[in-house]
Amino acid sequence: MQLDLAEQIISLVIICISFSIIMFDLRIKEADMLWKYVSYGFIIPVVLLSASILMHGKPVATFFAHSADTALVLSLVSLFIVNSENKWFVRLKYVPFILLVLFLFVGFFDSASKYLNAIEIISPAVLATSALVLLVFAGRLIGRKNTFFAALCFLALKGLLDAVGEYDPLCFTLSLSANICFGVFVPAKSLESLQNRVIKAEKKLSQLNRSIEPEIKKRTIEIERVNESLIEASKIDHLSKALTKTAITQEIERLIRVKAPEFSILMFDIDDFKFINDSKGHLTGDKYIHRLSLEARGILRKVDSLGRYGGDEFIAVLPGSSPSQAMLAAERIRKKVEELSSLGFTISIGVASYPHDARTVHELIEFADKGLYESKRKGKNNISRWSGNQTEL
């Protein structure tokens, strides 16, 4: 019996569907292994139906066309009989290829006289396989998405008709219907398994994020504290423990920027510091700088700021202090240093006030420096306030 034109067209359609199933699952690398192995089985109809078309007119062509579905069903049943967690399951991926080689061997190497005997053997096998399929899948797929079950029912009915030996056109129609069902269901299941994996991975990631979120917040707070400590440390002069030149200048800028009603600055240094360095050494000079900073900070208020401007020069910023209040604060510092004979040095101080004497950072520091210079000129160990061209003692 030869395949007519309609049956050949149906065979071509089945080949295309089977090939698309294979290619689709090969593209989805993370698909569930069960459905990936299912897709391997569709290499059977691709090869056997292609062989039946290429060998049109020969008895073996009909054999390949009728045996394609039998081999496919055997391959699919083997996958669902063995549990996917069984160690033998991974070896079932070779079943389609073994069946393919077996049917090709029967078709090509069996003599023509034995062809009908082969068909007589295959047809009952189809019927038996189909019955087994119904038993295996009825309990698994009824009540769920049953497209796969419906496809196998089509093949089972085709096997029954093959066994009877009638209704060849109907057989091919059933085979086509089954393959269309497979073409819809197998890729859908592969995508579903992939989506399930993605959902599980997202849940795990979400759980991981929730578990590490407190730790991240804790670490972030620690990092912020360390950064704040580093920033604060960068503002402190290592030797004197007072603010750096940049930090004390920024404090003056801040008070001007926030439009403070008034404030004053004191600039002071150690009298004859160069002579002290030259005669007693730089280590002694460093000790004097450290001690002066310590004594000045002990007298200043908490709201006041002290910074080392350079060398032995210091600037004290006194928020809210009028010129007269600044002069009194300067006198307390000068007198404290003078009374401590253990220090072995005196200081001179210059005073400038905002907005009475100057309105910019540069002018304030300049006027305080001129006041300091005036104190030096008058014999050192003195206090002077510079206001424009006038000096207040």
Image (cartoon, rainbow, N blue to C red):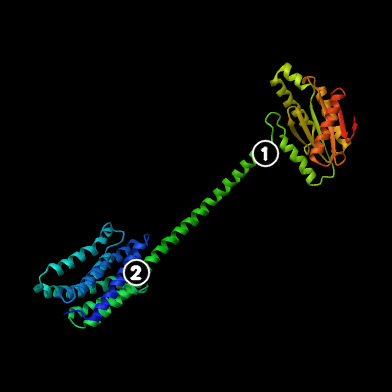
Distance from disc 2 to disc 1, alpha carbons, whole Å, reads 65 Å
Give whichever of 150, 322 is nearer the camera: 322
Image coordinates for residue 83, horizontal then vertical, percent: 29, 62
Residue type at the position of mark 1: Glu
Q: Quadrant of residue 163?
A: bottom left
Above/below status of 146 relative to 227: below
Q: Residue at x 85, y 40 (%)?
A: 358
Of pointers 2 and 1, the one earlier in the residue sequence: 2
Residue corresponding to mark 2? 186
- State the quadrant of the C terminus: top right
Mark 1 residue crowding within 10 angstroms, few (<14) / some (14–19) / many (20+) = few
Image coordinates for residue 55, horizontal then vertical, percent: 18, 73
Q: Secondary structure at mark 2?
A: helix
Q: Quadrant of residue 35?
A: bottom left
Residue type at the position of mark 2: Val
Above/below status of 384 relative to 4: above
Left or right of 288, for residue 31 = left
Image coordinates for residue 56, horizontal then vertical, percent: 19, 75
Residue corresponding to mark 1? 232
Which residue is farthest top? 279
Give whichever of 331, 264 is nearer the camera: 264
Q: Secondary structure at mark 1?
A: helix
